[in-house]
Image (tube, helix red, strand yellow):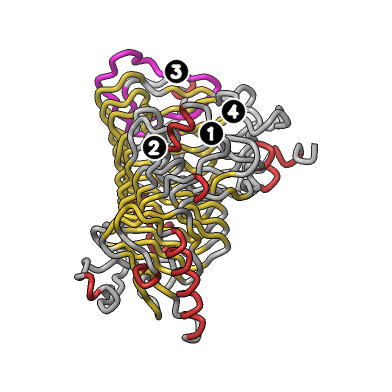
């Protein structure tokens, strides 16, 4: 097959693993490296009265703090040269009137006004308090969608208002069904400098209709996301609440310089596949200060599916995930994969808090995925009432089609997991490799797991590395370690 040679990626150049005198310095260096683009962090203004919506400007931008990765976004920020309320284009915020045409008309007209004003200054669409029912609409470059307090954008219950679009090249088909897929509620492709923000306004996908189609097996095409940006750069999503996505909630794919911060993401805990944030084949991504409740992973890093992801070969890299908290009874706080065929590298996770969940951290892959997961640092993780604290799992025969390459095996290497505390757990870590795949350079340091109810023994199969200051004692594959490696820092 044409993709067979590409199946066996070489790992990217590893990060230089330092030997700091103490873990806090390692975390500081990680954040310093992740924030090298630090420029400006923007926040929305407090909601003004409706009459002042187009008069009040947002506050001046504040500099990103030392422990923020928000400097990955290097756009102009929420303020724009031209602005208008969606009401100007005929929208009615009564929760019943369809505003699909109004939102589409608003984006097009604001883009035209910005061009007539000389271009370059951008446009801003204001959504005032009210309940604004709409189908899918596309954003444009140098654009801000601003939701004021009390504003709720509601996803249409008519599937025809979520049109079908082509599958992503790195997936080759819809993720759930063959053929095309439904577009996201808020969508954009090939854009630069897009801001979706506000003063805690809400975007509600009203996903129950879609979940029932999935449960009843009457879904004809893959469900749409709540927000998807494709092949775009300089994206800022902040200061809003996202609810009830039909499928994955926020999905930046083939994107760069993406910041998602200060978000509340909510879905019923039994809502299928309602991942919170899924960066996919994207680089320079910042996810910070988010609270997430969902029926799937809180955050999942992805990079394409089987032979299609291998062929496209677009990795996810240089990603910072910090100060994320939440619960998911079926999945993980932070997941890697299972769609990871383009590769995942240079990911820093810190200050993760998970409770009442299936796993805190999970590495998911499978035969046929190919690709790699390498240079991953995970630190300062706390968890309560979690089934499996840390898990490396093999797949469940989940493939794009029967043409996947059975010889394409993943490679997992250079994974550092440190400063982990867990209580009231059901199992010790479960580390199971895909048969024939390479798992090496896995490090556990300062891990304390207490109150394990069912299985206190680690379960390890063909996964190798080191463990220092770990309780309960690790499996044999992690006991033969020295005291002078990058893992031990001694």
User: Seen from this angle, which residue lies furthest left?
Assistant: 49
**Separation (CA) of disc 1 from disc 4:** 18 Å
Q: How many marks?
A: 4
Q: Earlier in the sequence, mark 2 or mark 4?
A: 2
Residue position for label 4: 398
Residue position for label 1: 219
Residue at image point 60% right, 40% down: 174
Q: Local crowd at mark 4 within 10 Å, few (<14), some, or many (≥20)?
A: some
Q: Is 411 situated above or below 315?
A: above
In percent of width and height, residue 23 lies at 33, 44
Q: Earlier in the sequence, mark 3 or mark 1?
A: 1
Callout 2–callout 3 Cβ contact below 8 Å? no
| Element carrying mark 4 | loop
Residue 444 falls within the magenta-colored stretch: yes
In percent of width and height, residue 381 lies at 32, 38
In percent of width and height, residue 20 lies at 37, 48
Residue position for label 2: 208
Q: Quadrant of the C terminus?
A: top left
Q: Local crowd at mark 3 within 10 Å, few (<14), some, or many (≥20)?
A: some
Q: Is 215 situated above or below 151?
A: above
Residue position for label 3: 459
Q: Nearer the viewer, residue 251 or 462?
A: 251
* The magenta segment: 443-471
């Amino acid at each position: 097959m044409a993709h067979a040679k590409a199946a066996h990626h070489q790992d990217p150049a590893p990060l230089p693993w330092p030997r700091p005198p103490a873990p806090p310095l390692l975390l500081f260096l990680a954040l310093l490296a992740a924030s090298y683009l630090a420029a400006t962090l923007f926040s929305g203004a407090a909601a003004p009265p409706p009459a002042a919506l187009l008069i009040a400007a947002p506050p001046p931008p504040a500099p990103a703090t030392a422990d923020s990765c928000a400097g990955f976004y290097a756009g102009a920020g929420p303020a724009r040269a031209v602005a208008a309320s969606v009401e100007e284009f005929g929208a009615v915020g009564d929760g019943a009137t369809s505003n699909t045409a109004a939102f589409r008309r608003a984006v097009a007209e604001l883009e035209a006004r910005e061009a007539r004003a000389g271009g370059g200054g951008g446009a801003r669409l204001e959504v005032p308090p009210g309940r604004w029912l709409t189908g899918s609409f596309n954003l444009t470059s140098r654009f801000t969608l601003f939701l004021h307090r009390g504003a709720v954008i509601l996803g249409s219950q008519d599937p025809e208002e979520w049109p079908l679009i082509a599958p992503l090249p790195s997936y080759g088909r819809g993720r759930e069904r063959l053929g095309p897929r439904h577009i996201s509620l808020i969508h954009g492709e090939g854009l630069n400098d897009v801001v979706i923000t506000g003063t805690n306004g809400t975007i509600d996908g009203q996903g129950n209709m879609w979940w029932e189609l999935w449960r009843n097996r009457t879904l004809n095409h893959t469900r749409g996301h709540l927000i998807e940006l494709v092949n775009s750069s300089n994206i800022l999503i902040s200061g809003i609440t996202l609810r009830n996505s039909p499928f994955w909630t926020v999905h930046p794919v083939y994107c760069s310089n993406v910041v998602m911060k200060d978000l509340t993401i909510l879905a019923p805990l039994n809502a299928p596949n309602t991942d919170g944030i899924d960066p996919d084949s994207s680089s320079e991504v910042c996810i910070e200060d988010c609270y997430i409740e969902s029926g799937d992973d809180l955050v999942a890093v992805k990079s394409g599916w089987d032979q299609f992801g291998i062929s496209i070969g677009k990795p996810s890299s240089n990603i910072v995930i910090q100060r994320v908290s939440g619960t998911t009874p079926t999945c993980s706080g932070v997941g890697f994969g299972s769609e990871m065929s383009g590769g995942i590298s240079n990911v820093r996770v810190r200050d993760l808090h998970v409770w009442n969940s299936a796993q805190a951290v999970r590495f998911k892959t499978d035969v046929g995925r190919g690709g790699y997961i390498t240079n991953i640092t995970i630190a300062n993780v706390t968890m309560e009432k979690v089934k499996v604290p840390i898990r490396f799992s093999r797949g469940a025969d989940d493939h794009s089609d029967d043409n996947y390459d059975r010889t394409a095996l993943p490679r997992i290497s250079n994974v550092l997991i440190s400063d982990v505390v867990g209580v009231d757990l059901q199992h010790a870590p479960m580390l199971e490799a895909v048969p024939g795949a390479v798992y090496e350079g896995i490090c556990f340091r300062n891990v304390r797991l207490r109150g394990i109810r069912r299985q206190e023994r680690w379960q390890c199969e063909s996964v190798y590395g080191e463990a220092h200051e770990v309780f309960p004692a690790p499996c044999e594959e992690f006991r033969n370690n020295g005291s002078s490696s990058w893992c031990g820092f001694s």
